[in-house]
Image (spheres, rainbow, N blue to C red):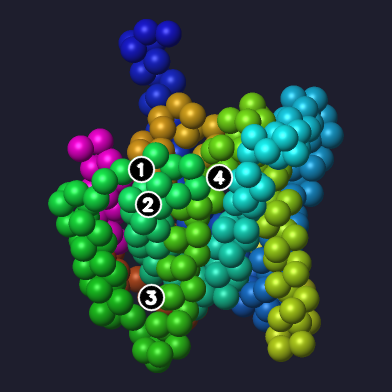
Amino acid sequence: MTAHSAQPRVLVAVIASVISGMLVALQSRINGEFGLALGNGFLAALLSFSIGLAILGTVLLFRRKGRSGLATVGRAIRAGDVPWWAVIGGAGGGFLVLTQGLSAGVLGVALFTIAVVTGQTLGALVIDTRGWFGAPRVKLNVWRIVGALIVLAGVFVALDVTPGDADVMGVLFLLPLLAGAGTGFQQAVNGRVRTVAGSALSATFVNFLVGAVVLAITFVIALPFTGAAVAWPTTWWLWVGGAVGAFFIAIQVTAVTIIGVLGMGVSLVAGQLVGSVILDAIAPVATSDLHLATVIGAAVTLAGSAMVTLSKKL
């Protein structure tokens, strides 16, 4: 394939990755509201992931290549060609969805996404520098350090006008920050599973299966403290977060093979931040208002994240 003929394919992959990032923000909005409606963020996360798993399992029944990919991954693990931890990336995704149900409905999508992107950027910086999880080792340089500092500056600007109790909001911000760091692990190992399986569907199914199991265990442990659902929402769109997640994960594991980790990282972050600001502007949660400083903080965070990601080439 020539460079000229590959350009449309790359452009489509970039656009798809940006849309994927916007869908991440949309899922945060949906699951945040879902958690508030249920009165139980743990249950909201479990239901969201389980619905996504059910959809993928149904599709898998009709796709021979997907089923064959699962068998290939199983053989590779038994043979020792793939380490066991390469298939548990869904745990990172599960934790992210859990924080959506616990935090996004209070923080608002923009501030929640700034926390996630900050965790993604700083987590990826550590993973790259250390060469963890099979990622190519990237030396720390001035541009990456400056980019990380710019990301932190964006957080400072965004948090400056956060309403509510500082201690409570700080904890709610910390949860998606940690979840964002976990997505660096998730993306690294999911790409590896996709390569071994030769199927985006197989990799996505494994991701959701592991995430659903982890969330089920977490829900059972938390149940004595959180109780059952206070109400079952009748608003239909609150139940589609899992379907949205299955869709954007499938996009990501496919697009990363076309535009690489760098292009995927920047496109995904851009979509997340732009999408979150739009959602908070047109459909804010009841407990959060979109402030100018939050928008500025999102823009600064995007600039710093892009600098950290793209400076891998330097």
> What's the amino acid at mark 1?
Arg
SS for dot 4: helix
What's the residue at 66%, 48% (across, down)?
A: 84
Q: Are marks 2 and 4 in contact (CB under 8 Å)?
A: no
User: Could you give the CA–CA distance between mark 3 and mark 4, rounded to whole angstroms?
Assistant: 36 Å
| Sequence order check, earlier mark of 3 and 4 | 4
SS for dot 3: loop
> What's the amino acid at mark 3?
Asp
Residue 52 at what x, y percent from top left? 71, 51
From the image, tell me which residue sits under label 3: 289
Question: Dominant secondary structure of the magenta stretch?
Answer: helix
Q: Which mark is residue 137?
A: 1
Label 3 neighbourhood size at 10 Å, few (<14), some (14-19), many (20+)?
some
The magenta-colored residue range is 298-314
User: Could you give the CA–CA distance between mark 1 and mark 2, rounded to whole angstroms?
Assistant: 6 Å
Horizontal placement of 194 versus 54: left or right?
A: left
Horizontal placement of 299 versus 94: left or right?
A: left
Q: Which mark is residue 130?
A: 2
| Sequence order check, earlier mark of 2 and 4 | 2
User: Could you give the CA–CA distance between mark 2 and mark 4, rounded to whole angstroms?
Assistant: 15 Å
What's the residue at 54%, 38% (across, down)?
A: 191
Q: Nearer the viewer, mark 3 or mark 2?
A: 2
